[in-house]
Amino acid sequence: MPKQPIVEITRVLTFAASHRLYNPDWENERNDEVFGKCNNFYGHGHDYDVRVTLRGPADPETGMVINLNIVDRITREEIVEPCDHKHLNHDVQWLRGINPTTENLAVAFWDRLLPHFGEALYKVRVQENPRNWCTYRGEKG
Ligand code: NI
């Protein structure tokens, strides 16, 4: 069989949530120093933008890597519904004990999606605002 072109396809979903960035093992002074305003005791909010990228050959019959309706449904069930209008430090069971930086969220979201998409999952990007985001591709090192 001839080689198929490999393409990447991305679905964008959004949700709103609050969080507080801090390390519970540190004195508040050090948390203020490292996390600044993000260490505000009662948290603060973001409009999160989550981009899930799948990679592979397009099926010759459908012209698709994967049906985006499936990507949308799974990402909604696994990430958007549990996190939307929640406090990420308190309300989401599978984020308990995790400092909800974009880095840690990208990894946690990846772990939620991987069982559904397997090798096709290529990249998860989590954006808090237009100035900063984090990308995870499942690498460890
Ligand atoms: Ni924040």
Image: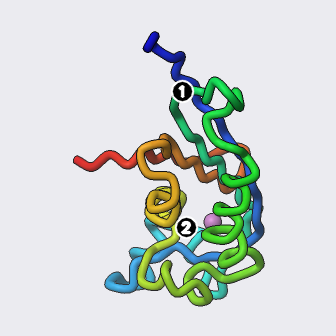
Up/down of 35 relative to 129, above or below: below
Q: Which residue is mark 2?
A: 36
Of 110 and 28, the residue lying toward us:
110
Q: Secondary structure at mark 2?
A: helix
Res 19 → quadrant: bottom right
Q: Is residue 18 in sight in this rendering?
A: no
- The picture places residue 4, in percent across and down from the top left corner, at 51, 17
Q: Is residue 92 left or right of residue 115?
A: right
Up/down of 14 relative to 58, above or below: below
N-term-proximal mark, 1 vs 2: 2
Please tell me how crowded label 2 is: few (under 14), some (14-19), or many (20+) other residues with Cα within 10 Å. few
Q: CA distance from mark 1 to mark 2?
A: 45 Å
Q: Residue at x 60, y 53 (%)?
A: 126
Query: Residue 57: which numbered mark, if any?
Result: 1
Quadrant hosting ligand 1: bottom right
Q: Secondary structure at mark 1?
A: strand
Q: Tag 2: residue type?
A: Gly
Q: Tag 1: residue type?
A: Pro
Up/down of 108 relative to 43, above or below: above
